[in-house]
Amino acid sequence: MSVASVEAPVWAHRTPRKRLMLWAGWLACVALFVWCWERMTQRTIWAFVWDAPNAAADIASRAFPPRWSYMERLWAPLWDTINIATLGTLLGIAMAVPLAFLAASNTTPSRLVLRPAALFVIVATRSINSLIWALLLVSILGPGILAGILAIALRSIGFIGKLLYEAIEETDIRQVEAVTATGASQGQILTYGIVPQVLPSFYGISVFRWDINIRESAILGLVGAGGIGAQLNSSLNMLAWPQVMLIILVILGTVVVSEWVSAKVRHAII
């Protein structure tokens, strides 16, 4: 038998066993999706669903044109919304920065106690939505922008703390070793070896979080935490759809402006 007559092995991307497991996985995903869909829609009144386009068209016809004369009553709540986002972000930064250094494995003074505690606080604050924080704080402090500021701050701790401590852990060890070789103290190592490396990330994270908080603070008034959301809630309760449309347009414009400002600031400082 010649060498040429020997058939070369045929390459396959997956073995028959892997292909069977892949199809079984897809089948399991489809079955899970069908089961979840049945669970979620078992109490759905489908007559309302089929009538939804007509209801949406009716509300839209009532909402146009927006009531532009109502704008004079929105300037103060809009200013409150911006203040809630800004002050909440600053307060969140003040609490998140120490937590980030305690949570980072290369800067924490205690891996057994302080690091797990800091990580727990970061995870806990990130797991609870700002609207839920606002509900709790309104129940404790009463309605007003203070509850909104604290809700934004608590929500920001987890976001800023997580991204910042990951940036701290990713710092170049060679720069830290160079500062250490000069006989620097731990504070000097932190100041000259780590902080300069994480400052660009810190600026970007802070501005990005402020941009997100502008969006979130706009709805906190729905639960009594102040801002333009309170005006939105009042207009919805009165079925004043032209006012609702105007408020939605104002929120949209505010978010667009904050996005532009955020992009410009990040481009300037990073």
Image (cartoon, helix red, strand yellow):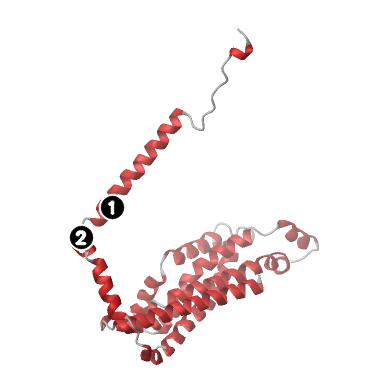
Q: Which residue is mark 2?
A: 46
Q: Which residue is mark 1?
A: 37
Most extreme residue toward the right is 182
Q: From the viewer's perspective, is 161 left or right of 70?
A: right
Frontmost of labels 2 and 1 is 2
Of the numbered discs 2 and 1, the one sitting upstream in the chain is 1
Mark 1 closeness class: few <14, some 14–19, many ≥20 residues within 10 Å = few
* Relative to 100, residue 210 above or below: below
**Label 1 amino acid?**
Trp
In the foreground, 178 or 269: 269
**Label 2 amino acid?**
Trp
Where residue 225 sits: x, y (%)?
A: 38, 81
In the foreground, 127 or 98: 127
The quarter in which the C terminus is drawn is: bottom right
Q: Residue at x 54, y 68 (%)?
A: 160
Mark 2 closeness class: few <14, some 14–19, many ≥20 residues within 10 Å = few
Q: From the viewer's perspective, is 106 left or right of 210?
A: right
Tell me if label 2 and label 1 are in contact, CB under 8 Å. Answer: no
Q: Residue at x 18, y 62 (%)?
A: 47
Q: Secondary structure at mark 2?
A: helix
